[in-house]
Image (cartoon, coloured by chain):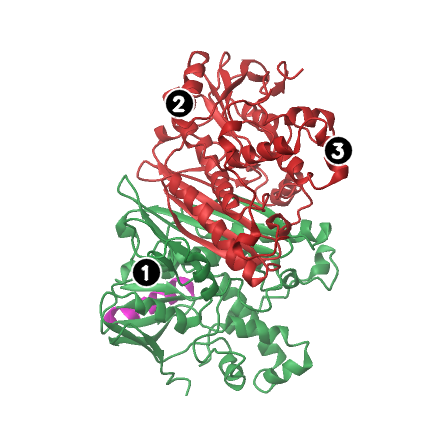
Chain colours: A red, B green
Amino acid sequence: MEVEGETARVNLNRAFDPTAFSLDASFRLVRYADPKGSTCKVPQKVLLNLLSILHPDTSAKDQDGEVSHVEGPRIGIGLDCAVIPLKYDVCLVQTTDLCYPIIDDPYMMGKIASANVLSDLYAMGVTECDNMLMLVGVSTKMKERERDVIMPLIYRGFSDSALEAGTNISGGHTTINPWCTIGGVASSVCRRNEFIVPDNVMVGDVIVLTKPVGTQVALAAYNWIDKPKLWRRIKKFMSEEMVRKTYFQAVNSMARLNRTAARLMHKYNAHGATDITGFGLLGHAQTLAARQKQEVAFVIHNLPVFGLLAEVAKSSRGVFELIEGLSPETSGGLLICLPREQANAYCKEILKEEGHRAWIIGFVERGNRTARIIAIHNP
Amino acid sequence: MEVEGETARVNLNRAFDPTAFSLDASFRLVRYADPKGSTCKVPQKVLLNLLSILHPDTSAKDQDGEVSHVEGPRIGIGLDCAVIPLKYDVCLVQTTDLCYPIIDDPYMMGKIASANVLSDLYAMGVTECDNMLMLVGVSTKMKERERDVIMPLIYRGFSDSALEAGTNISGGHTTINPWCTIGGVASSVCRRNEFIVPDNVMVGDVIVLTKPVGTQVALAAYNWIDKPKLWRRIKKFMSEEMVRKTYFQAVNSMARLNRTAARLMHKYNAHGATDITGFGLLGHAQTLAARQKQEVAFVIHNLPVFGLLAEVAKSSRGVFELIEGLSPETSGGLLICLPREQANAYCKEILKEEGHRAWIIGFVERGNRTARIIAIHNP
């Protein structure tokens, strides 16, 4: 289904113009990393193998490709964040993430990187981040002039996002490496009632998603405008203007914080949540289902997608696994399980507060801790 | 002066043998990063410039090349760690660092990277680290077989060091990039009496150093054994065997935690400390002097150096600035200012507990918050 109501808001967006900063018109930030279109992560299987040497019994891999080898009595292996119980009756909730440039606008890329880091805290219902560290890898291939223009814009985007989140950046490091990287660490020290351990999902719960999916497809479609062979796949369904609009929708969505979504999880008694990133909607839904205390299964029957990207993806199966729920997302929305009677109110309040829709995308039934898509709205 | 008493302990050390892991004999971990022999950091001047766009009034750069742009009432800009006062009457003390491989032994490299991260906490007298994140960049240039052998050894070294420090690794990320990087984040949540803000140095204090200096020269000398032209600089002063011995002394020193040194800072009423890393002994001493409340100046008259590296450095001025106190160190010791009458007891107790010497290297006089070396023991 197309996401309406989002389109109107993005007409102010423009592509990043390198010449406005006296850089060559051909400058493209995305070229300063070459992970072959794949995720910036080491493949999960390889990583698990590399880490297995450490602590064979306790090593675990959370759904964001993070290393979680846990010793002693810690809360929840495989959460979006590490949660470390401390003295003084508080817990340290902490997460880190890092990405390569996926768009050419350095300021927006900084915002996306920050939103992406913070999203793991928000997935656990933590709304107050006490500190962020900024971790930046400057590309050795950037000319000095490029570096001196581009990196401060990335920093500013990251920092503005942190301010928007009500937190600060105190500490970090900037190193050099052939590929550019942007990421950080988000930490929160809180009492147990300030976060929601996502293992309490009940039969009868409803599943809500707070951002559309399709960021990877949106970026690809936009990059294919200049590539006639690839553009053929797109133009049957979307005009160049529609692709541009959808691209900026996706960029703004990735830069948007999941903070309001996290706060309302408490108000509406959410039983568990996760954020949608590299493993796609279904991948993360499956991880969340697998960690439940109750014998539940998630059924997803509704797939909110940016623009007409669902049509594009359907005609390019094997290239995009969007309809299958497996297309990687960057800084996606929260997938939240909450009591059926609260779901509508949750969606209404988030729309009122943020001006962005959330969607009821499925329900929870009795089952064997798995998730599946029955996309009745996308037959 | 040569450091005696250290040499005997390192005779068990051997160079890393790639063939023992079915790798090619020519495998060298240090080749998987090429920062031109310099530090892994972006030059300080460049970094300050890049960051200046953010918050012109408050941006500051701490002495470990870390980004510290601080908003609001935080404790101490330019400390070794970020210190963030929180609700619940506690503070979050946090630091991050990252290095390229500087030795070929992956296990020891992991230990050094961990000790290097933790050292910033120890410099502030924080002895309990509540969590570490491990941040690893796998080189895209490693063959699969190399990666699958080398990276787990790095992880294990990092993890063993964390266990030694009484902490755990919960979280982190492993990404890919042409250059290999190893680092992490160390966080501690503590009350104000658990850390020592290093701004209370007094006239009459004595300066103690807990590890010798010369790590960079030790690594260079070792790498020059096979390079006849460069080896000529060394062989006038040290035999091949002495260079190897000194190298392993330095490696073990870099892997050693500054934790006991930190704990004893409380017992012996230290007025302030810092750890010695990329800016060399004098560079860090100057940074510490500059942040003092009192009008003090540091005078350093004693330079404990690994093996005979002082002689090597003296004959290669311009190449090594070791005697000048400016040779970069990795995971160096703590430089601690404490009351004169406590210094001997501090050094005695650390030797008794750890089996490693600490040295009184100077004193504090009235002055304009600077530091200088008058190397009377190295005329």
User: Of A272 and A36, which appears nearest the observer?
Assistant: A36
Callout 1: chain: B
Q: Which mark is residue A352?
A: 2
Report x, y in % for residue A338: 45, 18
| Three-letter code, disc 2 | Lys
Callout 3: chain: A
| Foreground disc of the pair 2, 3 | 3
User: Of A29 and A322, which appears nearest the observer?
Assistant: A29
Q: Which residues are magenta?
A: B339-355
Q: Is residue B131 left or right of residue A235?
A: left
* Tally of marks: 3
Decide: few, some or many residues near mark 1? Use Cα within 10 Å; few <14, some 14-19, many ≥20: some
**Quadrant assignment for the C terminus of chain A:** top right
Q: Secondary structure at mark 3?
A: helix
- Figure quadrant of residue B40: bottom right
Outermost residue, right side: A229
What residue did someone put label 3 on?
A232
Q: Secondary structure at mark 1?
A: helix
| Measured Cα–Cα span from mark 1 to mark 3 | 70 Å
Q: Which mark is residue A15?
A: none
Report x, y in % for residue A90: 34, 37
Which badge, 2 or 3, is on the more N-terminal residue?
Answer: 3
Q: Is residue B355 left or right of residue B70?
A: right
Q: Are marks 2 and 3 in contact (CB under 8 Å)?
A: no
